[in-house]
Amino acid sequence: MLVSIFRLGDIYLGINIVLIREINRSSNCTPVPGSRDYIRGMLNIRGRVITLFDLKRRLGWIDESQVDGMGGSKGYNVILKTHDEVQVIDDEMAENHCTWEDPVGLTVDGLDDVMEIDKDSILPPPANLGGISADFVQGVVEQQERLLILLDVKHTLGVGKEAVHLN
Amino acid sequence: MSQNGEDDDLLALFVQESLEHLETIEPNLLIMEEHGPDTEPEVINSLFRAVHSIKGSAGFFGLENITRLSHTMENLLGKARDRSILPSMAMSDSLLAGQDKLKIMIDDIPASEEVDATAEIAVFEQILNGGEEFDTPEVHAKAPQEDTVPATPDSPEPGVFDLSAYPDAVAEAQAHGRRLFSIALHLVGDQGDLAECLGNMRSMAESVGDIVAATPDILDPDFKLPLNLDTATLLFSTVLVPDLLQTMLDLPAEHIQEIALPEPAESAQPAPTVTGQEEPPPRSVEKPEPTRRTPSLAADKKNTVRAAAPTVEETLRVSVSLLDELINNAGELVLARNQLLRAAAMVGGQFPDLPPLVQNLDAITSRVQEKVMQVRMQPLSVVFNKFPRIVRDLARKLDKKIDLELLGGDVDLDKSVIEHLSDPLTHLIRNVADHGIETPRERVAAGKPETGKTVLSAYHESGMVNIALSDDGAGIDHDRLRLKAVEKGLITLEQAETMGDQEALMLIFAPGFSTAKTVSDVSGRGVGMDVVRTNIEKLGGAVHIEATLGKGTKITLKLPLTLAIIPAMIVSTAGQRFAIPEVGLVEIVRITESDRSQRIEMVGNAPVLRLRNTLLPLVNLADVLGLQRHFPPESDMAEQRETLADRRAPYMDESDYAALAGSGSESVEKRTDKRRSGDSLVAYIMVLRVANAEIGMMVEEVMDSEEIVVKPLPTFFKDNPCLSATTILGDGSVALIIDSAGVVESAHIKAANVEGLTNQDLDEDRRAALREKQNIVVLETVSGVPLGLVHGMIRRVEKISPDMLETIGGVSYVRHQGKTIKAIYPEQVMRLEAMGYGAEAGGEGCDLYMVIPNLHEVQAGLIFRRILDTRETVIDLDCETIRSDGLVGTAHIDDRVTLFPDVSTLIEMAGICTPGGDIPKGMDRQVLVVDDTPFLRAVTAKYLNGAGFIVDQAQDAKQALKLLKDKPYDLLVTDIMMPGMDGFDLAEEKHATRNAEIPVIAVSSAFSSLLEKRCRQAGFAGCVPSIDRVQLLQAAASV
């Protein structure tokens, strides 16, 4: 499968490119009072209201220096497709990996390659990985000088049946 | 036929279309019922076509039950069409029942086979059979050949069909470009072969077209093949050309003969049908006419008997989500246009060609948006059309005569509004039929026509759509409503008396209110009207009711045209912008620094705004949303906030309300400084009307009023009751739309009942704060004496003009709100002039203030010239320097000696009987009063002293215990909340003293039912609120 790779701190995260709608750098985000701390707020992208997840907070990196040092306007917003949009492309994918109906986005620090990943090379996630709970990891791929972590987007957004809530 | 997955789409289409057909059937059946034998053929034709379409499609899907039922209905309608059975009440009744059954089946296709329709079918057959018996010879003569042709089976020549006998087939053929053929079949072989052969031929033919008729009638399931039959002829309608048909049916060319179609009577050109099906597309929605239809005989014929003609509208079926997307993008286009306009205005001078281009784009964009918004609009007739049937059924059931007229069904409303209107309107209509319209006998007795008239009308008014439902029925009895409401405990007797008629009418919208004498299954469960109002208010609308007893009732619903775009006020608080829908926004009050202390007060633990004559509970938007409020850096509020905040509950930090309400003499200087420095703006209060209550919501800034496009709230935030939706502001950023009802809910303000708020349980911290401070109002008497009154003594303060004062026999009265209240000048009653006060002369002609004391059933008010201050402060009461009847003591407020009178004594001194006046006296009994607040202790002691008790005072439990050890007492009156040892501990400790057995009365400024319960459990003789003389003395007398 074709995976788009993003940098978050010093780790590399992969997201199936089918799930990605677009990437932008807008920082004009409206915070939502009373929402969970990992929700940065709402973003307007051509008339669609996108809920923006702060990926670092979501992954439990609550170290403020880390968040503040690299977050903010320097990062990128990865806007994801919704269930209905994915369904047009890949029914199976939509049913199993893209169950959210609302337009959502994730914040990342940097952009990297897009590369083809052989399904056989995906390994099951180790219990704890660079401070990321295994719940959020679909699998890992060993590459020459780095470990690529495939993000389980459904669990990250907490919208799956077995939704994970970090409280 | 099997129903596999691929058929699902088709099946859904079938369901949708069938439902649309059913919708056209109902109004036509009602017309038929009314006009009976005079029903225009077109109505019956239309009915026949609709049922036929359903039957045809159901047959295609193999839905036998539906096919069977619709088939019998079609048969019956067929007879009615050819007038062999004349439409009758029994017929329309049975057809309506059949239609209902069909609807049940079609609503749930998978279960349709289980639905039992045998009863309906039996009724149809009975009419079908009975109809033939009653048929008169003339009717038979008029009947077309269809029935008579089989009687002459020996002329099966091709071209035997007279097309004029089949107007439907001809019309359909003309409309859809079909051809009619006469097909000759030569039958050879024995009985069995023939039957099979005919069956095969028939199914083959029906797969490519319709067999319109046949001679002999092989279409009749009961048809028995005559022995001598060798030819049969079919009249066949199909879209196929002759060559193709010939191949399909595998017949020799000479057996198939095309019949030339007559010229179309009207220029019905073949119109495109989107569905690709043969039946005419649905038309009920697009046609405004049906809404004018009324089941009334008396109504204008021209308007009533227009049936749904088989016109072909050029319509498209488009999914709502696609429309939403389109609307969304149109909204975006408007935003982009606005940005472009701004940019163009700046650079326009440099590029002369640009402004006209931009202007053109501007105009086009506006048109696009307007049209796009119209796309979601639907005529109200979609909802209205079901009511004639409901009214008819109800009228029958209730034995009443009701005529319903529908007006303005072509008024368009947004789909989202229409969808939510059906239930509330149905309820209202049921109510009218059940309670509004009287029985015919009652009506005649009242001099009205037997038939009750009900009008449901829709019209535009000031940007809203009004839907009015009026009747000429019994109306509503205001007094009965009042009585009922008192009975149900919804209002007090007092409220009922003062309530205006309009207000009384609104009572029917109160939850749990129903005036029906008996509960019927039609309405009167008492859960209706409040739900109606809630639903309408949810849509951003309002309900209004007018009624005259004996004349009728009119209920008007005011609804917004659309929910997709609403007017809203953009405000900002804590540096973030929010949109507040203007629906329900009553007014905006601007509060400046100098106003603050005067108008914002603390009642109990709740901040209120004194707005005109009402107390408005306040919430701060930032607090409710959990945002950090911004404080102006130069403000001294911030430090006050810190000192107070640690003593107050975290959830609603109202420290600055306290500051607003005045927080002690030490801050007075600062405040006066600020006053001098000018009116710095402090806050805006959005006065919101939620349900029946008004609240004030404080925001920092009001920016603009805008028409905003409502976008749904992402599901991640659905659990926040304060947010209703989102919108995109002019600069492209997202803003949240505030849900006013949710804000009130989260702030725990249940109603605008401020008196209720005073009784709210206070948490420990706040009790501690209250114990030391009193909320006081400092007023100036007409002669210029400052008097201090504690909030607990005051029910309300009214502003009165001097001409409301009248003097009768040396006593002044105030006429206020229709009541005569005795006016008391406190300085006169207390004879303050004699004590050297009151040198200043009162300003004549100025407005005065009347304080209504918080004493039950006392019709008297204290008259003052003006309110000097309201604040929460420590009263350092001096009970010794000045002694006078009715005076509790004096205290320094703003370096001025202020007298603190006891209101109840004052009233008594003025010669007005107070409820506590006849309480038995204390008979020299010894009582110990314990309270750490000097003021309250002094008041309590004063009350008891006045009632004949001999009073000792103690400032805390320690001192009290000392006294209790030394001296015998008859009664202990103690404050509950005291530092160190509280009232409960004291009562416990007293067992170790000589006064172990004496009764205890608890006094508390934080009085609540919870506290009362605890006191009872602790074995106290009573628990009374502070400064309530009557309760205190009653409790003291009872021990």
Image: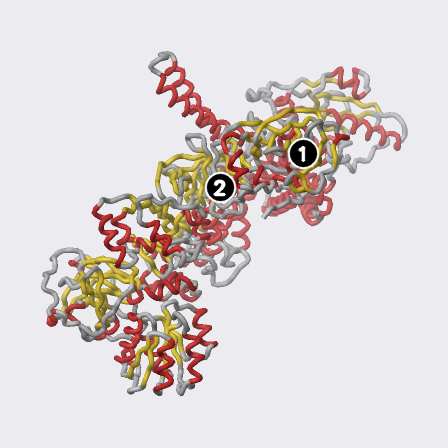
Pointers 1 and 2 within a single chain: yes
Q: Which of B309 and B431 is in front in this view?
A: B431
For label 2, the SS is: loop
In the picture, the disc for residue B237 is none
Residue appearing at x 82%, y 35% in the figure = B224
Q: Position of residue B475 (x, y in %)?
A: 40, 55
Instruction: Please state if B933 lies on the left or on the right of A104 as rendered.
Output: left
Q: What residue type is labelled 2?
A: Val
Secondary-structure class at tag 1: strand
Residue at figure coordinates x 28%, y 73% from the top left: B939
Q: Which residue lies furthest to the right in this view?
A: B190
B545 in relation to B837, above or below: above
Reply above or below: B122 against B726: below
The chain letter under disc 1 is A
Left or right, residue B269 beside residue B592: right
Decide if residue B413 is in sight here.
Answer: no
Q: Which amino acid does label 1 sit on?
A: Ile
Q: Choose top left, top right, bottom left or bottom right for residue B338.
A: top left
Give the x, y percent position of residue B825: 17, 67
Q: Name the residue under label 1.
A: A149
Residue of label 2: A32
For label 2, the crowd category at 10 Å Cα-Cα, with few meaning under 14, some 14 to 19 and many 20 or more, is many
